[in-house]
Amino acid sequence: MSEQARVLPMVVPEEGLPERVTIYEVGPRDGLQNEAAVVPVAVKAELVRRLVAAGLPVVETTSFVHPRWVPQLADAAELLEELGRLSVPAPVLVPNARGLDRALEAGVEHVAVFASATQTFAEKNLAAGLDSQMAMFEPVVSRALEAGLDVRAYVSMCFGDPWEGAVPVDQVVSVGRRLLDLGASQLSLGDTIGVGTAGQVGSIVESFAAAGVGTERLALHFHDTYGQALANVHAGLRHGITTFDASAGGLGGCPYAESATGNLATEDLVWFLTGLGIQHGVDLDAVVATSVWMSEQLGKPMASAVARALAP
Ligand code: MG
């Protein structure tokens, strides 16, 4: 019996899309914080190292959130010490001033803050309002900038909110604009519950452009809950977006929907971009091998279709 040929994506470039894309890996932070299992620090360190070795140009490693809220990431300081200095930017999430203190103590150079585009989620997740969250971030961001750090700002619930339903695009732009005005270098617009649709992506990107925010300041963060993540990436590419968040193996369930799938899987994004002839610098096989290994550690199947198809 002859061996089957290795399956690779068919590469057919599409005119008008960016030549190169940055894949911003969030698996160790956003992924693991939403997994039920608490993973040993040595496994987390190996996950980060494998992702860096696979060519991911930025790997968000952990969060200095209070362990009471996210026990999965209670070992943030230990993990950073274990990792030492990496060859790529390794941002950490800092939810508040105390989180920033801990990040500075750990010698971190890139941080991220996590805001909400809706009042209800700001209340539930941040114990703040749509306006008062800014008062919370202002001293964190300004102190981070004074210390020479780069600050990314996540905006969650940009495409829909489980309590409020539709989210007015002007509200999303207003929250994003204020975070950039505080000094954030990039906004990551999150479809936290995965309800976003392709036309909506273009509408949001264009609304930011109308408010003077170019595509170079925007990243898109999709969840595959309804199977729309790659369609939404395609819409983002057509509107000139060049940074997309993804999580190896699709790590991270969706905390607000009873679904197995959360974050867009890195290998699904890699396959998709490769097929379009877009450069990304990431080794597909290395990411798949990492996801297979990680799913063994977690004792659960991979959410990524590409990893399932390619896994040995
Ligand atoms: Mg996410």
Image (cartoon, helix red, strand yellow):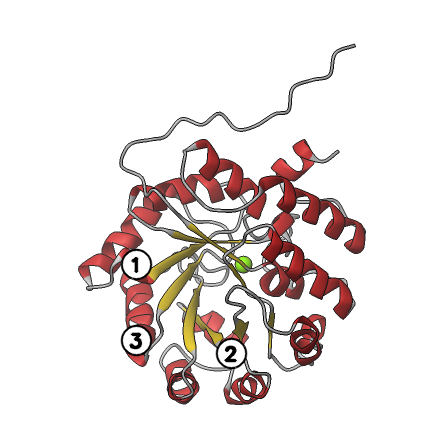
Please say if 9 is above or below 26: above
Contact between labelled residues 1 and 2, with CB atoms less than 8 Å apart: no
* Front one among 235 and 54: 54
Q: As shown in the figure, which amino acid type bears the numbered disc 3?
A: Arg
Closest to the camera, between mark 3 and mark 2, is: 3
- Residue 38 in percent (x, y) is at 76, 66
Report the disc number at residue 126: 2
Report the disc number at residue 178: 3
Q: As shown in the figure, which amino acid type bears the numbered disc 2?
A: Leu
Query: Between marks 1 and 3, how big is the CA–CA gap?
Result: 17 Å
> What is the secondary structure assignment of the residue under circle 1?
helix
* Front one among 120 and 247: 247
Left of 43 or right of it: where is 244? Answer: left
Q: Which quadrant would the N terminus be assigned to in this image?
A: top right
Query: 10 Å neighbourhood of mark 2: few (<14), some, or many (≥20)?
Result: some
> What is the secondary structure assignment of the residue under circle 2?
helix
Q: Earlier in the sequence, mark 3 or mark 2?
A: 2
Query: Between marks 3 and 2, how big is the CA–CA gap?
Result: 17 Å
Closest to the camera, between mark 2 and mark 1, is: 1
- Residue 262 in percent (x, y) is at 59, 52
> Does any atom of ligand 1 lie closer than 8 Å to the CB of label 2?
no
Q: As shown in the figure, which amino acid type bears the numbered disc 1?
A: Glu
Closest to the camera, between mark 1 and mark 3, is: 1
Q: For the point 49% across and 47% down, which residue is it?
A: 281
Residue assigned mark 1:
216
